[in-house]
Image (tube, rainbow, N blue to C red):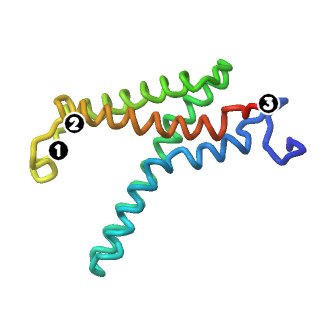
């Protein structure tokens, strides 16, 4: 059934509204924009053979950012919308929890299947100081993305 404004609906409630889709589109940008700018500058100075590698890394970065937005951000948003919790605190809290869960999954994965020395020459491990730094960094980045999503899709402008 199509609504008058062109949104897909199930019964009387919308699956995802235009603001929510825009929010999910914009959420990874605060993290992606500086990194893509850095890769773009490297791309301008790169040799022809390096350009393909840089483009591949940029694509991986974009896919990872939007993949995490869908795998973690979408369930968080749907849960909070179902509970009718629309405060910034709820979005930030669950996003930070999601970041620590991702860090935990990475730590368990690394513990069960350690990377070869060629891929990890400094011997950094997710269950040590480096892992704590990665988890905190992820939490900050997830919170920043959640804030952008909340401002775009959830927050109601004050009249």
Judging by the rendered image, the residue that carries numbered circle 2 is 110
Instruction: Give the quadrant of the C terminus.
Output: top right
Real-space CA distance between mark 3 and mark 1, rounded to the nearest whole angstrom: 47 Å
90 relative to 101 in the view: left or right: right
81 relative to 141 in the view: left or right: right
Q: Considering depth in this image, is 13 or 133 the residue closer to the camera?
A: 133
Mark number, residue 13: 3
Task: Point out residue 124 in the picture as x, y percentages from the top left corner.
Answer: 14, 40
Count of picture labels: 3
Task: Point out residue 113 in the picture as x, y percentages from the top left corner.
Answer: 19, 38
Q: Earlier in the sequence, mark 3 or mark 1?
A: 3
From what the image shows, is residue 17 above or below residue 103?
A: below
Q: Earlier in the sequence, mark 1 or mark 2?
A: 2
117 relative to 7 in the view: left or right: left
Q: Earlier in the sequence, mark 3 or mark 2?
A: 3
Element carrying mark 3 = strand
Judging by the rendered image, the residue that carries numbered circle 1 is 115
Q: Are marks 3 and 1 in contact (CB under 8 Å)?
A: no
Q: Considering depth in this image, is 60 or 115 the residue closer to the camera?
A: 60
Q: Are marks 1 and 2 in contact (CB under 8 Å)?
A: yes
Crowding near pointer 2: few (<14 within 10 Å), some, many (20+)?
some
């Amino acid at each position: 059934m199509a609504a008058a404004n062109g949104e897909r609906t199930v019964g009387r409630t919308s699956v995802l509204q235009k603001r929510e889709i825009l929010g999910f589109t914009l959420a990874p940008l605060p993290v992606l924009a500086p990194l893509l700018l850095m890769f773009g500058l490297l791309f301008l100075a790169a040799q022809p053979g390096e350009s393909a590698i840089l483009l591949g890394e940029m694509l991986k970065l974009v896919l990872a950012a939007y993949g995490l937005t869908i795998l973690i951000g979408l369930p968080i948003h749907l849960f909070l919308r179902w509970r009718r919790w629309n405060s910034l605190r709820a979005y930030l809290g669950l996003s930070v929890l999601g970041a620590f869960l991702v860090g935990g999954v990475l730590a368990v994965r690394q513990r069960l299947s350690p990377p070869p020395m060629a891929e990890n020459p400094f011997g950094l491990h997710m269950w040590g100081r480096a892992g704590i730094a990665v988890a905190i960094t992820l939490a900050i980045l997830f919170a920043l993305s959640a804030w952008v999503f909340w401002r775009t899709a959830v927050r109601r402008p004050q009249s």
